Image (spheres, rainbow, N blue to C red):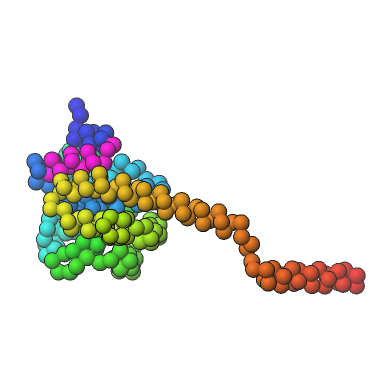
Amino acid sequence: METFADYILDEKDLASKMEITYYLAKKTKIFFDKSVIFKTEIARMFVDYMKIDVDKNIVLTACLLCNCKKIDNAQDIEKIHSYAKEGAEYLANLGFDKRFCKICEEINRYSGSNPRERESDVLELVDQFGGMLLDRPERIGFKPDEAMVLLEHRNLKDEYNRYLHTFSEFVDMMEKIELNDLTSMKALRRLTKIYKDSEDVKVFIKKVCYEYQPKIEKAYQEYTKEIKDEMFENSNRPLFSEETTRKILAHISEENESYKETENE
């Protein structure tokens, strides 16, 4: 008998996965809002663009479901510490295997689950980084470069995440890619603006999957082509300037003369 886990994991189209999760949330009252879609899209780009060696289907499905028992109450410390583990237990009842549930539990480190799965490190990065980009009642969202500094030097200062350095490179790259609409805007900032402008989850899903994704894919391809072209141009240039080359050759010549004199002695 097919379980919900089988059903959503067999669905490879991300927009359809999002819609499935949306209707599950409507029926069961699990946590699912625009921030989940926002973070899942960041995860998709990170895994695709940085060629991360993880199961992409597992990562994206886990992104949609790992916060299922989260609550909108930053003051409830006990719940903050327990929601990931409770969510993993809930997902086990939906038919997900132990490894998938372990990945979801490891979105944060409160349960002490160890060793951590590769996919869990991706979830941790996009969950914390994505959350910092969004406005909260007590603060406005951080800019991507600011959020990355906080992620490296505060949130994960004393923790090991195998993809942290690669994620930093990803954010740096995304800050160089611009999407042109009515105005030009950096890729992650455009995604944040779409998040703010979308009135509900269903609208945001459509805007991300059918408007943002085609534009970012095109912009990414153009960016990588420019980088490759620049590398090719640089490969045809001399490694050193003409003056530096003369100095190096002169030094080599002196070394050779000195060696010959030593040999003659």
Which image quarter: residue 112? bottom left
Determine the residue positioned at 86% across, 69% down: 260
Looking at the rendered image, the quarter that the N terminus falls into is top left
Q: Does residue 245 appear in the picture of this structure?
A: yes
Nearer-the-camera pick, 114 or 166: 166
Nearer-the-camera pick, 248 or 32: 248
Q: As displayed, is residue 61 above or below residue 35? A: above
Determine the residue positioned at 18% across, 58% down: 196
Magenta span contains residue 28: no
Q: Main secondary structure of the magenta part?
A: helix
Magenta span contains residue 24: yes
- Bounds of the magenta span? 12-25
Determine the residue positioned at 38% across, 60% down: 176
Residue 147, percent across and down? 29, 65
Nearer-the-camera pick, 179 or 111: 179
Looking at the rendered image, the quarter that the C terminus falls into is bottom right
Residue 143, percent across and down? 28, 66
Q: Does residue 112 appear in the picture of this structure?
A: no
Determine the residue positioned at 38% across, 51% down: 220
Residue 144, percent across and down? 30, 64
Which image quarter: residue 258? bottom right
- Residue furthest to the right: 264
Residue 248, percent across and down? 71, 70
